Amino acid sequence: MSGRDSAVLVLAVLVLEDGRAFHGQAYGAVGETVGEAVFATGMTGYQETLTDPSYRRQVVVQTAPHIGNTGINDEDDESDRIWVAGYVVRDPAPRPSSWRSRRDLGDTLAAQGVVAISGVDTRALTRHLRERGAMRVGISSTTTDVEQLLATVRAAPTMTGADLAGEVTTRQPYVVPAVGQRRSSVAALDLGIKSMTPRLLAARGVEVHVLPAAAGISDVLATGADGVFFSNGPGDPAATPHPVELLTEVLDRRLPFFGICFGNQLFGRALGFETYKLRYGHRGINQPVVDRQTGRVAVTAHNHGFAVRAPTDGPVDTPYGRAEVSHVCLNDDVVEGLRLTDASGRLTAFSVQYHPEAAAGPHDAAYLFDRFADLLSSRVETS
């Protein structure tokens, strides 16, 4: 809440599906909400986190104790609204302090109806989630009855089996023009795309045709694009079959492909690999990932609760070419990237599980956009 120096504190409660409860004060909108409890480790970038569509139906716990210090500005949103189902912070700033700030975080949460809680021991909550795994959670500032809220939480749907891309995608196609000379074009399937991604492609001379998640191969081909991109997004990849079917048609046509985050998981499924739910996921801007070809380690931004199960001991032949794991996380060996090559060993498609657009986060992985732009340009030159 803005102006909390004079505001009346409203009590709130957070209840996990295993029965553990945390008490605090209402922050943002007064009300009740449920979702999957996940924690994000970034010390900065809360505005980008809140507006990332990948957080649909998730209650985000910020591990950094002080949130809201820099307020909300007009430049850093990754979509046109806040997507988190709820928000948990320890010590919200009483007032923002940044020359870029235009609004207070608490006021913004309230204006968009986002129920949040403050004054929570987020370190203890995060440790609990690390030990027990991600689980459903409820926040209420309309009741402090733990048993009543627990019953609501346990009746809520789980993230496993959730097909959510259609809830966050664009309703109409749109084009982001190339900046400067147009080198190529790409059809980008919006599964929950962040606004920074098309901008970074456009900055490399790529004209981006953003399509709804329900688009088919005819829609892709109608753009005349030189390749295809799959964005990040929420939900269970095993419960999202349509994009996988589309991607198999893209790969059949040998169109260059690049996928990030959810796009990486769908790429894995299109290649015949399984996906599975991580115990508590990777969310934050400090995850170390190694490129297995070069040995280069990048500090990367993550937001995923599912991952691809693929062999790391060598390549696998698929109907579309030879596939192999290109990147792994150094913390837990989770697959963080895939690459596909043709019979001559030439790269035709690739993906990463993390966020090279780094909004927010480090820029170590920005070179991947250059790689894709070059792949698209090579197709233009040979066509």
Image (spheres, rainbow, N blue to C red):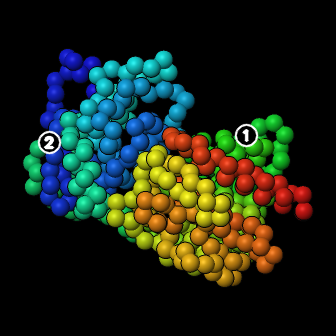
Residue sitting at 29 percent across and 22 percent down? Answer: 94
Residue 295 found in image quarter: bottom right
The spot of residue 179 in percent (x, y) is: 77, 37
Q: Quadrant of the N terminus?
A: top left
- Compared to 278, does 97 lie above or below? above
Residue 103, numbered label = none
Residue 69 visible in the snapshot: yes
The spot of residue 319 in percent (x, y) is: 69, 82
**Residue of label 2:** 23
- Compared to 186, does 310 lie above or below? below
Q: Secondary structure at mark 2?
A: strand
Residue sitting at 24 percent across and 62 percent down? Answer: 132
**Residue of label 1:** 203
Circles 1 and 2, Cβ within 8 Å, touching? The answer is no
Q: Secondary structure at mark 1?
A: loop
Q: Quadrant of the C terminus?
A: bottom right
Return the residue nearer the eye: 62 or 16.
62
Return the residue nearer the eye: 64 or 269.
64
Circle 2 packing at 10 Å, graded few (<14), some (14-19), many (20+), is some
> Farthest residue in the front direction?
295
